[in-house]
Image (spheres, rainbow, N blue to C red):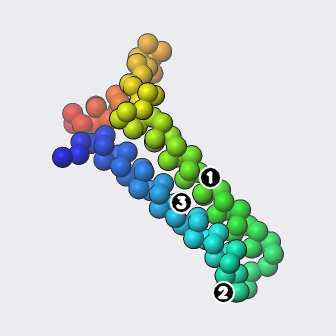
């Protein structure tokens, strides 16, 4: 059974993967099926391409961060003790919420 933290990370990963696929689909349509797009000016076309590229970059960044910090065997996935700096960290909020 998945715990609360696993579900959060799983949901974040699923969202990032969906955003990646959406961006790739849009870029593919813009690049290969531009005739099907219709009444786009060159500015609209470039704006749509740029938005799709930004969505792709953000999705890839999110997936990289999940892999880097939340994969069980990642060396960086070790818990960081933020309490030394007076920062509670996400784990403290999740743990506190779970106790409610």
Q: CA distance from mark 1 to mark 2?
A: 25 Å
Q: Give me the C-alpha separation between circle 2 and circle 3.
A: 22 Å
User: What residue sits 60% from the left and 57% below the top?
Assistant: 56
Residue at 50%, 40% in the rendered image: 65
Task: Assess disc 1: are there few (<14), some (14-19) or many (≥20) residues with their C-alpha within 10 Å of its C-alpha.
Answer: some
Where, quadrant-wise, is the C terminus in this rendering?
Answer: top left
Looking at the rendered structure, the secondary structure element under dot 3 is helix
Place of residue 43 in the rendered image (x, y in percent of width and height, measured from the top left): 80, 71
Q: Which mark is residue 36?
A: 2
- Whether pointer 1 and pointer 2 mark residues with C-beta atoms closer than 8 Å, the reply is no
Task: Say what secondary structure mark 2 lies in.
Answer: helix
Q: CA distance from mark 3 to mark 1?
A: 8 Å
Q: Residue at x 42, y 50 (%)?
A: 12
- Secondary structure beneath dot 1 equals helix
Q: Residues within 10 Å of mark 2 (few under 14, many from 20)?
A: few
- Residue at which label 1 appears: 57
Q: Tell me which label, 1 or 2, sits earlier in the chain.
A: 2
Task: Inspect this view and state whether residue 60 appears.
Answer: yes
Query: Hey, which quadrant is residue 66 in on the image?
Result: top left
Q: Where is residue 95 shown, x and y percent of the image?
A: 28, 32
Residue 42 spot, x, y in % from top left: 81, 75
Q: Nearer the viewer, residue 44 or 74?
A: 74
Q: Residue at x 74, y 73 (%)?
A: 45
When the figure is inspected, residue 1 is found, relative to residue 98, above or below; the finding is below
Crowding around mark 3 (Cα neighbors within 10 Å: few <14, some 14 to 19, many 20+) is many
Q: Is residue 26 left or right of residue 71?
A: right
For residue 64, side relative to residue 6 (left or right): right
In this figure, which residue is indicated by the disc labeled 3?
Answer: 20
Marks 2/3 in contact by CB < 8 Å: the verdict is: no
Q: Is residue 40 above or below residue 55?
A: below
Q: Earlier in the sequence, mark 2 or mark 3?
A: 3
Q: Can see residue 89?
A: no
């Amino acid at each position: 059974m998945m715990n609360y933290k696993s579900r959060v990370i799983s949901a974040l990963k699923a969202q990032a993967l969906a955003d990646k696929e959406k961006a790739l689909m849009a870029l593919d349509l813009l690049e290969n099926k531009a005739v099907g797009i219709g009444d786009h000016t060159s500015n609209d076309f470039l704006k749509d391409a740029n938005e799709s590229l930004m969505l792709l970059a953000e999705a890839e960044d999110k997936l990289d961060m999940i892999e880097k910090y939340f994969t069980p065997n990642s060396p960086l996935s070790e818990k960081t003790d933020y309490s030394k700096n007076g920062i509670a960290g996400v784990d403290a909020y999740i743990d506190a919420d779970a106790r409610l």
